[in-house]
Image (cartoon, rainbow, N blue to C red):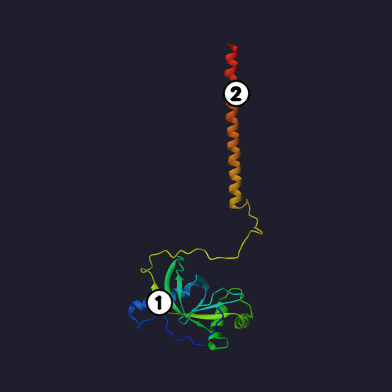
Amino acid sequence: MTERATEQVSEQPVPATGQGGPQAAGAAALLGEAMAKSGLLWIEVADDRTWPAWHVWDDGAALVVSGPGEQPLPWLPKEVRVILRSKDTGGRLLTVRAHVHVLEPGTPEWQRAAELLRASRLNSVDDSLTRWAAECTVTALVPFDTPLESPGAYAAHDHREPPARTAATTTSWRPWHWGGRGEEKAERKRARDEAKAGRRAAKERAKLRKKRQRRGTRRRGR
C-alpha cells in the first residue's frame, strides 16, 4: 500500500441513534462494541484474499498501520468489506462496508491515529512514529451503511477459503520435540506393530513345524 491521500475522513459511520431508527441504532451499538472489544478484524479486498489486521477503534473509524516491520496489507481500494468477530466465541459477527482513507503524515489526523496505534501496539519502540511516517501507511477504515451480515442475517455459504500461500518452511531445520513428532511416533508405532506381527507369525510357523514333527514321529512308530 503506497498511495497516499490528503483527503480528510468525512464519511459518516453506521447511523447512530436518531439517524435511522432503533434498528440502525442497534447496528451502530453492536459495531462499536465489536470494534472496541476485539483488536483484530479482517479486510476483504475485491479480487484478492481476506487480510487479518490489528486495529484501534476511534471515533467511528478503525485505524490500521501497515508496511515494513508492521503487518502486511495490500494496496486497498476506496471501498472494502470489513469482517468483525465475536470476542466471546471468535466467530463471525458483522460484515460492513467501509471507506478507505490513507492518512497523510504531518496532518493532525495522522498524528492522532499514529499516537493511538503506538499506544496499542505490542513491543512498540520510541522511533515508531518516525519510522511510520517514512516507511509505513496509516489507514482509516470508516464503516458506512447498514451491515451486510449481522446476527440472524448471515450468508448461506460457509466462507471457507484455502490457506494463503507463504514462503515459511521448516524443511531445513525442525525443532526438537520430546518423544518425537507426530509422524515420527506413528512410524515407530508402525515398526513396533510390524515387529509384533512378525513375532506372532514366527511363533505360528514354529507351532506348525512341531505339529508336523509329532505327526511324523507317530507315523514312524506304527
Mark seen at residue 29: 1
Q: Give whichever of discs 2 and 1 has the lower sequence position.
A: 1
Residue 192 circle label: none
**View extreme (front): residue:** 47
Determine which of the numbered discs, if any, sits on residue 210 in the image.
2
Question: Looking at the image, which is closer to me, 139 or 125?
Answer: 139
Which quadrant does the C terminus fall into?
top right
- Mark 1: few/some/many CA within 10 Å (<14, 14-19, 20+): some
* Residue 173 x/y as whole percent: 66, 59
**Residue at 59%, 45% in the rendered image:** 189
Residue 128 image offset from top left, x and y in percent: 62, 80
Q: Looking at numbered disc 1 in the image, what kind of residue is underneath it?
A: Ala
Q: Residue sitting at 57 percent across and 14 percent down?
A: 219
Q: Residue 208 at what x, y percent from top left?
A: 57, 26
Disc 2 marks a residue whose amino acid type is: Lys
Tell me where residue 70 appears, x and y as whole percent.
59, 75
